[in-house]
Amino acid sequence: MSDDPRLDPRYDARLSELISDTADSVEPGEGLTAIRSRTHQETTMSSSRNWLYAVGGAVAGTAAVIIAIAVVSQLNDDDPTPAASSSPSASESAGQPSESTAPTDAATDTPTSSAPTGTPVEGAVPVYYAGDSGRGTVLFREFQPGIGGDPVAQAAYAAVAGPPLDPDYRTLWPGGTEATASYDGDVITVDLAGGALHDRPKGMSKRDAQLAVQQVVYSVQGAAGERAGVQLLLDGQRTDQVLGQPASEPLTNADPTTTLSMMNVTLPEEGMVVSGDTLDAEGVASAFEATFQWEVRLGDQVVARDFGMTEACCELSPWTVSVDLADLAPGTYTFVATNDDPSGGEGFAPDSDSKTFVIE
Amino acid sequence: MAGPVSPAPAWHDTDADGAVEQLYAAHWRPLVRLSALLVRDVGTAEEVVQDAFVALHAKWGSLRDPDRAIAYLRRAVVNRSRSRLRHLKVVRAHAERQQAPTVARGADEAAMDTHRRETVMEALAELPRRQREVIALRYYVDLSEAEIAETLGISRGAVKSHASRGAAALRESLRHHLGDNLEPPGGSP
């Protein structure tokens, strides 16, 4: 590879010709009509939308933000940069708190903080809960139906108080903790209440205390659609610490690779009733060579199994798989997605996530 | 395709609908073609570029500048093409398992053109993803090293190395189409 073929201008020109000729042989159809109809739909997108529809969008949007954060430490790396680092939804939305309404961000970005409590469901709210992995406790994201009002406040409350929809998840906050939150476009303020939250409770590990705080940080950032700093308050007052963790300054989200599960199923949701011949499962994962395994189980019996691929390798990125249900009898099943294990069983068990669903 | 649009309309006064229409007129076809080089499927490429325009429409309030808008569209198209390709690969793997299509080729000139273009598409498809992106942006869109670096969010050094490796690989896989009247540099191939 010592000779640079581009040094020969004849090759360069010919290559350009070949590639341009190939590209120009593509004759696109008309696209403006479809674009117009979609942009008009978007501006009038109303609450009549099923919130699950919004989940699909939220997955991409939030994942892009997470990935953008994840690559900050690799900016000087000349290796191929992870997919979403330059993605418009991630880079352009930073610093434009309330203008970002790209369709992929619809569920999380739409500012609804001015909406009065009790308005119809606007979208799904991301909430982060603790769960088990081979590496110890990590955080999983689940989407909960919006209840109207400020999604940031809902996310904060749901994160500390629960309950998660998925019984494999749990909140790390002491029972009785409550929270409210708001986002002023600069800092997300979370006001915690409900007990002795200043010091780390006896019996709570430092790691769990850190993860409890990160449950809140990730949840409100996800609901706000911004990686904004998160200022924690105790009973409305500034505090030097929460659960024994420093909290005098706005907090940032911790490194996703050590904080989040590298496999997270979004659909099916826990307990979802599925009809029809196909289940379109989706989630996010950071998988070795972008590959993961999935299974559908009926009790202990595996009734379907295949592999899936994430959109990008080596960072949390979206995936979808289509599960053929045509041959499955009505009943309660479990969908399990597990990352590939490059160590062949030598290291920690790879991250995994599961959801129960019902075929009617 | 990055050149200024003239006569310059009052972009700052243009609403999102107007901006999308003007940008569509100038950039729809080249962007679909760019995406087609990356995903090898015109229908998918059209969807990708539609998605990019819809996203642009939502972002117009924060862009308000045709140069930034086209840079945004290009980034969106490359990123979305990449995502779709992941999906397409899985779909194609399944499809190929079921049927191995045979392509019947005639001998007339049109068939030769088609064959050559298929070969170019295949050669591009065989490149590692990043090399393919750099090659498409360099040789089709005609972007500078710095513009490619910005579009892909990688360093100029990385652009240089991907371009060089990609071009070397294409020189090999497209040698029948490249070598017509050329002596390979430095003697024997």
Image: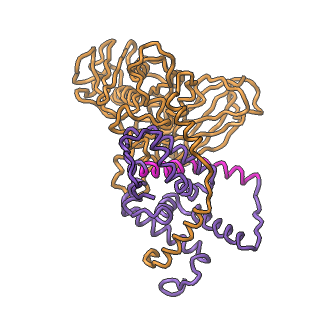
Chain colours: A orange, B purple
From this view, report whether residue B154 is shown above or below residue A72.
below
Q: Nearer the viewer, residue B136 or B185?
A: B136
Q: Give residue B121's quadrant in the image.
A: bottom right
Q: Give residue A66's quadrant in the image.
A: top left
- Look at the image and tell me in which quarter the C terminus of chain A lies: top right
| Residue B74: in magenta span | yes
Residue most extreme to the front = B7
| Residue A134: in magenta span | no
Q: Would residue A151 be visible to someone looking at this image? A: yes
Q: Nearer the viewer, residue A176 or A315?
A: A315
User: Residue at left 55%, top 55%?
Assistant: B29
Q: Nearer the viewer, residue B61 or B25?
A: B25
From this view, report whether residue A306 is shown above or below residue B102.
above
Residue most extreme to the bottom = B187
Q: Would residue A129 be visible to someone looking at this image? A: no
User: Residue at left 77%, top 62%?
Assistant: B102
Q: Main secondary structure of the magenta part?
A: helix
From this view, report whether residue A294 is shown above or below residue A8.
above
**Magenta stretch?**
B70-98
Residue A297, horizontal then vertical, whole percent: 67, 31
Residue A5, horizontal then vertical, whole percent: 47, 76
User: Residue at left 62%, top 62%?
Assistant: A25
From this view, report whether residue A39 is shown above or below residue A73.
above
Residue B115, horizontal then vertical, whole percent: 68, 69
